[in-house]
Image (cartoon, coloured by chain):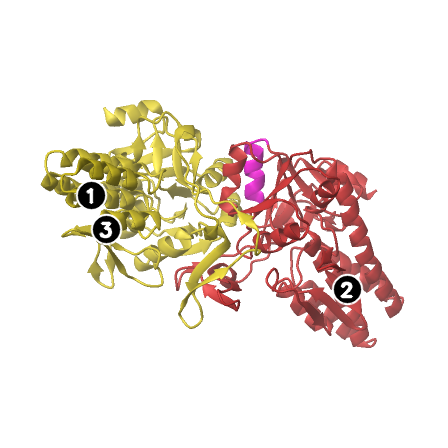
Chain colours: A red, B yellow
């Protein structure tokens, strides 16, 4: 994706550092964050400086390379680092996938770990590109598409999952409109997806998460596409909190509900959605909001009753039966055990 | 309801002024707004200094008294004022109910208009109290109750509709917990409902609007109670945006979904939900948020991508079939034409 005419990946490695677009500053500032050690990469994932299934995976892969570089053959230190990286975010499957792959590759040599991590980032881009090509076939001219959270370029190394078909449809000259769910509490829709769509000149409007049913009930939404953080062997999908709610509403109004994700998001050893661990994040994400005030200074404000408690589950699980199809880099499949098995055989 | 030991109504009239708790400043500041003319009362309704079906109704009734006082018998001016008051918020039935009643009463004398408006405020309190008594019967000990927006004390002259049963259950010593939907974009849940519940020492947590399905799917929600802005003759209910979404999710997980509202919220001349006008509010309510920064200064910040558009429908319509019952001051009724007809005969 290009920003101000220059092409960027969401995350990349150079020397011993991992570089990434700082997604906590977007859309107000475009800054690059440098993680000089695996610990700093862990911090970046935890604090959501980088976020989104694919971007977390790529960063975790690079962090594992850093762990190899920093542990100088000390196995205990290496294992400790691996555990730390895996503990950053519990739900995203791509994280564990990437750490495992780079860890195993590094058993041969550090160079092999690095080559694997770099290759995985390249693969991530190619998978996202393919998802776009397959997903585009579902999008008719004039379609109004709803999406939740950000499963765009910023959630991957490039292109994205849920947004990739939208980018391709736009390139092909289709007339499309995107309803962007704000996606509280961190507002990745209002901040990141809206930023990406504006960057690509795709017509869109931010809507409160509460307004999805309103537009679906009026027949204004032709389809919904979301990303995924982990897909179980039976086709259940863990994704950003609120996805389940939208899938239920979409079923009610017969709006086709699609999930877009690469194979690296599937956890074929996880039998069903109930087995996916759900991250509970801090209540301050609900109670406070951050953004530029009138004078441009990024300011944190309280947006709720002082002293009230808040709960902040970061993900929910959408059962397979609510999902019309999963758009992967190998084609669009039905969300069931049989189709998923076939995908991996 | 008491604030710092002193009893307040949400809105009241004294002399020629209408006084109200400024709900745009809560929960950060407790201030009383004085509307010295019907035009200022109109502004207060439009800007949501006062809000909520019952409170809008009472304020509109008082504004109509002000219109009588200010028009000095000039019929054209009186009609103009009536139109202006009615144009402040299109969805809330109580507004039209109150304006009509005070307007008709004023044909006899201004004193009669005032007496009627004052009586309506008293009735509003008594209705809300009765709703609490009836609604409490539905609440079991240990219940976890979800509510959306604010249909509490602040939404009425006192007690509230959806929160009134919760207040009664708490008074009766029942152990209850309230999931408070944040209710974007204006966050009446996080700001007003949470404030009321904390004021009454009722255990609660604010949840993002996205998290309703998560908790319902896990069996954590025993019932949901919401208010109403207008109820059609067939039992369809217009209420704060997001209510429809919750009702659909509640149906999916067999969570009993109740609406609490006085008879003045029913529009028996409105055949169904499709006939209820839905207010579209400004996009700045979605794009910006306001609250105190670190140093306590109330600050407005941008919480979305600069330059992106936003849509802001203020209400949606929940079809009768998703509602288990409507809690009124005359008892709990089924949301259908027959039961509603009986209520008004």
The answer to whether residue A109 is above or below residue B330 is: below
Give the tally of numbered discs. 3
Q: Who comes first in sequence, dot 1 or dot 3?
A: 3
The answer to whether residue A72 is above or below residue A111 is: below
Side of A222 where B324 appears, left or right:
left
For disc 1, the marked residue is B67
For disc 2, the marked residue is A12
The stretch of residues the image draws in magenta is A243-254
For disc 3, the marked residue is B11
Instruction: Find out whether residue A251 is within the magenta segment.
Output: yes
Q: Residue at position x 23%, y 24% from top? A: B345
* Prevailing secondary structure of the magenta residues: helix
Q: Pointer 1 indicates a residue of which chain? A: B
Mark 1 packing: few (<14 Cα in 10 Å), some, or many (20+)? many
Near-viewer residue (B179 or B143): B179
Of the numbered discs in the image, which one, if any, rests on residue B18?
none
Q: Which element type, helix, strand or loop, lies under badge 3?
A: strand
Q: Gap between marks 2 and 3, in whole Å? A: 59 Å
Side of A156 where B116 appears, left or right:
left
Near-viewer residue (A319 or A191): A191
Mark 3 packing: few (<14 Cα in 10 Å), some, or many (20+)? many
Q: Which element type, helix, strand or loop, lies under badge 2?
A: strand
Near-viewer residue (A137 or B258): A137
Q: Residue at position x 64%, y 62% from top? A: A23
Q: Quadrant of residue A203?
A: top right
Percent coordinates x, y for residue B157 in the rendering: 24, 48
């Amino acid at each position: 994706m290009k920003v101000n005419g220059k092409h960027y990946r969401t995350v990349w490695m150079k020397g011993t550092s991992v570089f990434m677009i700082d997604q906590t500053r977007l859309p107000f500032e475009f800054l690059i964050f440098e993680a000089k050690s695996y610990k700093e990469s862990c911090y970046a994932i935890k604090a959501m400086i980088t976020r989104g299934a694919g971007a977390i995976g790529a960063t975790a892969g690079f962090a594992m390379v850093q762990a190899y570089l920093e542990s100088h053959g000390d196995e205990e230190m290496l294992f400790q680092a691996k555990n730390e990286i895996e503990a950053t975010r519990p739900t995203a499957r791509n994280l564990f996938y990437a750490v495992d792959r780079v860890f195993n590759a590094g058993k041969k040599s550090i160079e092999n770990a690095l080559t694997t991590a770099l290759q995985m980032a390249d693969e991530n881009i190619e998978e996202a590109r393919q998802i776009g090509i397959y997903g585009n076939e579902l999008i008719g001219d004039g379609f109004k598409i709803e999406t939740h959270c950000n499963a765009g370029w910023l959630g991957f190394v490039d292109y994205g999952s849920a947004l990739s078909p939208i980018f391709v449809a736009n390139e092909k000259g289709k007339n499309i409109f995107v309803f962007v769910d704000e996606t509280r509490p961190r507002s990745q829709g209002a901040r990141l997806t809206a930023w990406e769509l504006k960057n690509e000149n795709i017509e869109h409007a931010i809507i409160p998460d509460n307004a999805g049913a309103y537009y679906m009930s009026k027949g204004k939404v032709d389809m919904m596409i979301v990303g995924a953080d982990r897909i179980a062997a039976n086709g259940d999908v863990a994704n950003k909190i609120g996805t389940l709610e939208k899938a239920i509403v979409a079923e009610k109004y017969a709006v086709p509900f699609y999930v877009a994700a690469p194979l690296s998001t599937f956890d074929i050893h996880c039998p069903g959605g109930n087995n996916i661990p759900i991250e509970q994040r801090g209540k301050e994400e609900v109670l406070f909001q951050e953004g530029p005030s009138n004078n441009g200074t990024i300011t944190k404000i309280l947006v709720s009753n002082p002293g009230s408690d808040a709960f902040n589950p970061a993900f929910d699980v959408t059962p397979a039966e609510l999902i019309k199809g999963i758009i992967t880099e190998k084609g669009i499949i039905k969300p069931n055990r049989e189709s998923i098995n076939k995908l991996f055989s």
